[in-house]
Image: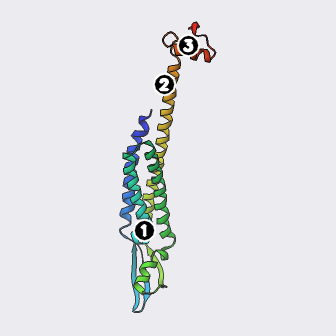
Amino acid sequence: MSARPRDRRGPLLLLAAAAAVLALAAGAPTWVSGQVVTVTGDTAVAATGRQAAPVATALALVALAAVVASTLGRRAARAVAALVLVLAGAGVVAASAGVLTSPPAALAAPARAASGTTQAELVGDPDVRPWPVVSAAGGVLVALAGLGVLAGARQGRAATTSARHERDARREVASPREDPAAAWDSLSHGEDPTAR
């Protein structure tokens, strides 16, 4: 019974690793581009995912580290690593969604650098590419895989506990003739050990 959660854990960790790599790879291309007013005229500016949402890249790396920790650690370490996967995945989603909901904020740093002023003025609305959605999808998969590993760890713990109770119950059924201590146990339970 406890083998099933372990069997499921491998594919879930592979999914988490692949999704974290997807989120990392999605951070390399340009996410947002636009035009900023400078002294010499309008200048094109762009921000990659790593510039627009550095937290998403950092959390994707954390998710990869949690996958490795989950394969090497004991049961408690695996549960903590699974929880880290859930939180890291949710963080990747939140950081990626932040770029989708506020593209001008994602372009703020490159726009300031291009204009040479602290209050850079963008021309029109920035153009948002689909990469933040890809990154968010990777984060969702990381979080779901972490939830699956966490649920498997709980099932494994429950199976181990029930197996231990079954072993204890089998021990109590020992015949008083085979085990004198069992006779005392029978008496404490209100049974007559000589009746067996």
The amino acid at mark 2 is Arg
Dot label at residue 54: 1
Q: Which residue is mark 3?
A: 183
Residue 130: x, y in percent?
42, 67
Q: Quadrant of the N terminus?
A: top left
Q: Are marks 1 and 3 in contact (CB under 8 Å)?
A: no
Please tell me which residue lies in front, 64 or 171.
Answer: 171
| Pair 3/2: label in front | 3
Residue 31: x, y in percent?
41, 71
Q: Residue at x 64, y 15 (%)?
A: 190
| Pair 1/3: label in front | 3
Report the Cα–Cα distance between label 1 and label 3. Answer: 68 Å
Q: Residue at x 50, y 68 (%)?
A: 98
First-in-chain label (1 vs 3): 1
Q: Residues within 10 Å of mark 3 (few under 14, many from 20)?
A: many
> Which SS class for mark 3?
helix
